Amino acid sequence: MSIKWIHGRYKEDSRVFDSKWEAEEWADSLYPDIVGEGFVNVGYATPDKKVADFLMRQIPRWAEYLRTHNPSMPAVTVGTSTEMVDGLLLYKVWIAPEMN
């Protein structure tokens, strides 16, 4: 499976936000980018665990909303991992089609 990673487009991608509210506002603003990339097989990497945690909770809600408006959209699952890149721990979150 090939993931289209959308991080790297904004300066905030490498930011660790001061508050949970800021992190959630930032992560929620990624919705148009994620949907614009087709929603399935799309991922985001961040050094901020708060952003990753929010995306893990929010992506299923976005998927449910999208499926109510487009029933042909496949069911999805959220994948997560961590990776050390240049001494920085990145939290990765991606959307994959649900395997039946």
Image (spheres, rainbow, N blue to C red):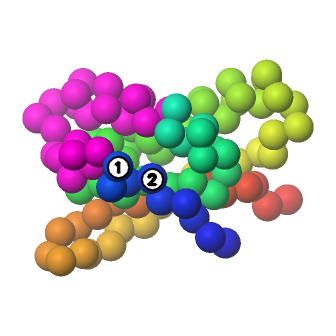
Q: Is residue 98 visible?
A: yes
In this view, which residue lies farthest toward the right?
72
| Residue 68 picture location, percent across and down | 79, 23
Residue type, mark 1 in image: Arg
Say which residue appears at 24% left-offset and 24% top-offset. Answer: 21
Magenta-colored span: 10-31
Q: Position of residue 3 (x, y in %)?
A: 57, 64
- As drawn, the residue found furthest toward the front would be 9
Residue at 17%, 69% (x, y): give it: 88
Instruction: Check if residue 20 falls in the magenta segment.
Output: yes
Vertical relation: 83 (above or below) 60: below
Gap in angstroms between the C-alphas marked 1 and 2: 7 Å
Residue sitting at the far left: 18
The residue identified by callout 2 is 6
Q: Is residue 39 magenta?
A: no
Q: Is residue 51 above or below residue 6?
A: above
Query: In this rendering, does residue 93 appear at all?
Result: no
- Number of callouts: 2
Q: Residues within 10 Å of mark 2 (few under 14, many from 20)?
A: some
Q: Quadrant of the N terminus?
A: bottom right
- Residue at image location 42% in from the left, 66% down from the top: 81
Query: Where's residue 62, x and y in %?
Result: 60, 31
Q: In the image, which disc is placed on residue 9?
A: 1
At 32% across and 26% down in the image, what residue appears?
25
Tell me: residue 11, above or below residue 85.
above
Looking at the picture, how far across and down is residue 24, in whole percent?
Answer: 32, 30
Judge left or right: residue 97 versus residue 15.
right
The amino acid on which the numbered mark 2 sits, given as a three-letter code, is Ile
Question: Do the residues bearing badges 1 and 2 touch, measured as CB atoms within 8 Å?
Answer: yes
Q: Main secondary structure of the magenta part?
A: helix
Q: Which mark is residue 43?
A: none
Dot 1: element: loop
